[in-house]
């Protein structure tokens, strides 16, 4: 998955990428690199580097004698963490959050069930510690600290599933969780029931109870969807 670099081309991407994903440049729009280089006050080589990153995300394609064309949204790499971040920053945030949360609800319960069967002792210990850290930061408006442990918890579940396809979704889930916090699509403090469910998932995984781990994780994702109904209708 692509991550924009720092420096001048990173500066261009942080402006141009969100503009594309927000629809300021609709699919089929032709971007002239010379004009863009002037607009952003960068060299053509810097602009070409930025375009290459956008091409790697399948947001645009370059054609000789045509220019840089914005691709249809159906062709975008919607799993790219940066594309997710840009889309969550735009007006389409509620729909994007719902789409990603539905993805989580389809994947994470199954991953938790597999984790109960395949997690190592170290992974179980890390999962339990993450759950305890979530409890410790779940009160007193500590959402950013809570987020760190929440992301770590869900990464461990995906990795411990033993399925490499699930494990690769760790960055996607991280962006969903981070986006909810950064864009204030969260209550001031996390739902106490959700926090408790994470502790219970860790216990189920450690105890090798696959069906319970799956059931509890499904409750977490259902709760996340219900929160969106309230906070991002």
Image (cartoon, helix red, strand yellow):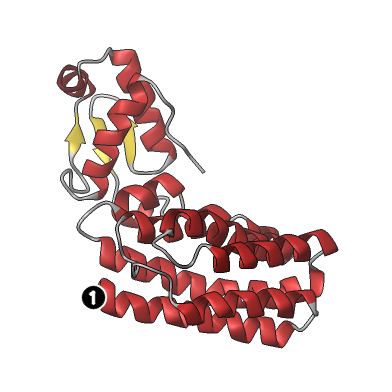
As displayed, is residue 178 above or below residue 43?
A: below
Identity of the residue drawn at 19% across and 24% down:
36
Picture quarter containing residue 15? top left
Q: Is residue 56 left or right of residue 151?
A: left
Q: Nearer the viewer, residue 204 or 119?
A: 204
Q: Tell me if residue 69 can be seen.
A: yes
As displayed, is residue 100 above or below residue 210?
A: above
As displayed, is residue 214 above or below residue 135?
A: below
Q: Nearer the viewer, residue 69 or 38?
A: 38
Q: Tell me if residue 169 can be seen.
A: no
Residue at image mark 1: 233
Identity of the residue drawn at 83% across and 63% down:
120
Secondary element type, mark 1: loop
Q: Nearer the viewer, residue 13 or 187?
A: 187
Picture quarter containing residue 152? bottom right
Give the percent coordinates (x, y) of residue 201.
65, 77
Identity of the residue drawn at 64% across and 82% down:
214
| Number of residues whose C-alpha sits closer than 10 Å to that of mark 1, classed few (under 14), some (14–19) or many (20 or more) | few
Picture quarter containing residue 215? bottom right
Identity of the residue drawn at 23% across and 29% down:
66
On-image quarter of the C terminus: bottom left
């Amino acid at each position: 998955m692509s991550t924009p670099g720092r420096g001048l081309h990173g500066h261009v991407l942080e402006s141009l990428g969100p503009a594309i994903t927000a629809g300021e440049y609709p699919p089929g729009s032709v971007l002239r690199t010379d004009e863009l280089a002037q607009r952003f006050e960068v060299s053509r080589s810097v602009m070409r580097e930025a375009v290459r990153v956008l091409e790697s995300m399948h947001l645009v394609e370059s054609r000789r004698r045509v220019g840089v064309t914005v691709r249809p949204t159906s062709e975008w790499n919607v799993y790219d963490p940066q594309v997710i971040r840009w889309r969550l920053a735009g007006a389409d945030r509620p729909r994007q959050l719902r789409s990603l949360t539905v993805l989580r609800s389809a994947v994470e319960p199954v991953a938790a069930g597999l984790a109960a069967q395949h997690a190592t002792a170290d992974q179980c210990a890390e999962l339990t510690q993450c759950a305890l850290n979530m409890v410790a930061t779940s009160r007193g408006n500590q959402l950013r600290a809570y987020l760190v442990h929440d992301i770590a918890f869900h990464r461990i579940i995906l990795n411990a599933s033993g399925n490499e396809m699930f494990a690769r979704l760790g960055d996607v889930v991280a962006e969903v969780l981070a986006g909810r916090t950064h864009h204030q699509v969260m209550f001031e403090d996390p739902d106490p029931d959700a926090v408790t469910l994470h502790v219970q998932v860790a216990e189920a995984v450690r105890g090798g109870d696959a069906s319970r781990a799956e059931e509890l994780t499904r409750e977490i994702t259902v709760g996340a969807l219900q929160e969106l109904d309230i906070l991002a209708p």
